[in-house]
Image (cartoon, rainbow, N blue to C red):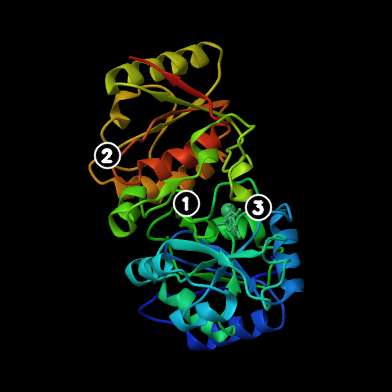
């Protein structure tokens, strides 16, 4: 493996390694960093060559712009031409944290970083290790999720090693991430703020703070003629190797249906995977059952979603069946990812 892997935690930051990461980034290299959402693949956001390298390492389509990460509020005005009042309010309330804002870009941000767009996505992460690396790198780090394009986002350093260990210079292992879902993206380039990607900060939380906020129509309608405004949201994503089907409805009916699928597969000598919760895992006698977390503590579902999808790639199952997770606060964000992973294959039972 090419990448040097360095472990550290927010409590014990290895400043020597942080300085080294900063040097690599300033010289145009790539360093994977932990953040509170998912691991990011960092490159200097103001260096077009670094951005091109990020696209190449991930196999990411070059029309899919990168999020620029900052570690000081004052840095925002250097990379955007305008900060609307509502964006200021959100930044004050949710930064540092899992919120990305789309604003008109300043000239110093190269088009290579923004996928050719005149706007730029900006986030100020709360993870202390990420903040130190961003500062050491000069203040502006473009960091998409550190996975191969199309695969589940990485929530542990092991996932980054698996996908990108041979393609990048350094990986900082900060342990498992806290949230496990990518940031909420809010677009400020129109009059009313628009959510382009749901995340840990829910639409309701945004509305409570700002009043009117819309959800991008392209997210709500699966009809492919309505394109999501965030270029990245149109791609199939997060897909495990086996076919994934979601079963939604009342708990008992869902368990019954999934057990029927598992029995049919077993009769054909096939193995299936089942994504359950702590509450239901014991109700599936057949197949490889993985609990994603507890419905009593929905954050645990966000934390483990990508890990469970990734783990099934090592299990040689022929199909995966998952319960639906429409939990009150982050359900929208979780189901957005799960539906994409399933190619929108969902069965309703009652
Ligand atoms: P990732 O880096 O994997 O978290 O993905 C970043 C997401 O932000 C993708 O869905 C991008 O399409 C979206 N994004 C980044 N910059 C912009 C922008 N300027 N306008 C709209 N969407 C953006
Ligand atoms: Mg991504």
Choose between 175 and 65: the one closer to the eye.
65
Q: Position of residue 148 (x, y in %)?
A: 65, 52
Q: SS class of the residue under badge 1?
A: strand
Q: Is residue 98 above or below residue 286?
A: below
Residue 286 position, x and y percent, is: 41, 22
Residue tagged 1 = 194
Query: Which element type, helix, strand or loop, lies under badge 3?
Result: loop
For disc 2, does the CB lie below 8 Å from ligand 2?
no
Q: Which residue in the structure is indicated by mark 3? A: 148
Label 1 or label 2, whichever comes before in sequence order: 1
> Callout 3: few (<14), some (14-19), or many (20+) C-alpha neighbours within 10 Å?
many
Marks 1 & 3, CB-CB < 8 Å contact: no
Query: Residue extending furthest left?
Result: 296
Using the image, determine if residue 83 lies above or below residue 233: below
Q: Reading the chain from its start, which is encountered first: label 2 or label 3?
A: 3
Q: Secondary structure at mark 2?
A: loop
How far, Cα to Cα, is label 1 from label 3? Answer: 28 Å
- N-terminal of the pair, mark 1 or mark 3, is 3
Q: Residue at x 69, y 68 (%)?
A: 168
Residue 133 appears in the rendering: no
Q: Are marks 1 and 2 in contact (CB under 8 Å)?
A: no
* Mark 3 vs ligand 2: CB below 8 Å: no
The residue to which callout 2 is attached is 295
Mark 2 vs 3: CB contact within 8 A: no
Residue 128 at x, y percent in the picture: 41, 76
Instruction: Mark yes or no: residue 25 visible.
Output: yes
- The residue lying at 30 percent from left, 46 percent from top is 329
**Could you tell me how far apart the alpha carbons at marks 2 and 3 are, in whole angstroms?**
30 Å
Location of residue 6 (image quadrant):
bottom right
């Amino acid at each position: 493996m090419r990448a040097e892997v360095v472990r550290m935690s927010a409590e014990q930051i290895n400043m020597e390694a942080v300085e080294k990461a900063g040097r690599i980034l300033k010289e145009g290299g790539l360093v994977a960093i932990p953040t509170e959402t998912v691991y990011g693949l960092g490159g200097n956001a103001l260096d077009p060559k670094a951005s091109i390298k990020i696209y190449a390492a991930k196999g990411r389509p070059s029309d899919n712009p990168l999020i620029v990460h900052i570690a000081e509020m004052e840095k925002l005005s250097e990379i955007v031409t305008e900060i609307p009042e509502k964006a200021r309010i959100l930044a004050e309330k949710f930064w540092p944290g899992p919120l990305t804002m789309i604003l008109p870009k300043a000239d110093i941000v190269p088009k290579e970083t923004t996928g050719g767009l005149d706007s730029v996505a900006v986030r100020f992460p709360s993870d202390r290790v990420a903040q130190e690396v961003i500062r050491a790198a000069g203040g502006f780090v473009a960091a998409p999720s550190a996975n191969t394009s199309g695969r589940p986002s990485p929530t542990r350093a092991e996932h980054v090693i698996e996908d990108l260990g041979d393609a990048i210079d350094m990986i900082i292992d900060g342990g498992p991430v806290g949230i496990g879902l990518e940031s909420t993206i809010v677009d400020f380039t129109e009059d009313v703020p628009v959510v382009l990607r749901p995340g840990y900060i829910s639409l309701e939380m945004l509305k409570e703070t700002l009043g009117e906020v819309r959800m991008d129509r392209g997210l709500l309608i699966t009809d492919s003629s309505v394109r999501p405004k965030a270029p990245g949201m149109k791609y199939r994503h997060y897909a495990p190797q086996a076919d994934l089907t979601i079963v939604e409805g009342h708990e008992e009916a869902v368990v019954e249906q999934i057990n029927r699928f598992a029995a049919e597969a077993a009769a054909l000598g096939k193995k299936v995977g089942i994504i359950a919760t702590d509450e239901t895992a014991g109700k599936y006698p057949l197949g490889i059952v993985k609990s994603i977390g507890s419905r009593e503590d929905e954050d645990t579902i966000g934390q483990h979603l990508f890990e469970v999808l990734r783990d099934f790639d090592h299990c040689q199952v022929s199909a995966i069946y998952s319960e639906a997770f429409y939990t009150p606060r982050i359900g929208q964000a979780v189901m957005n990812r799960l539906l994409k992973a399933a190619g929108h294959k969902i069965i309703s039972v009652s």
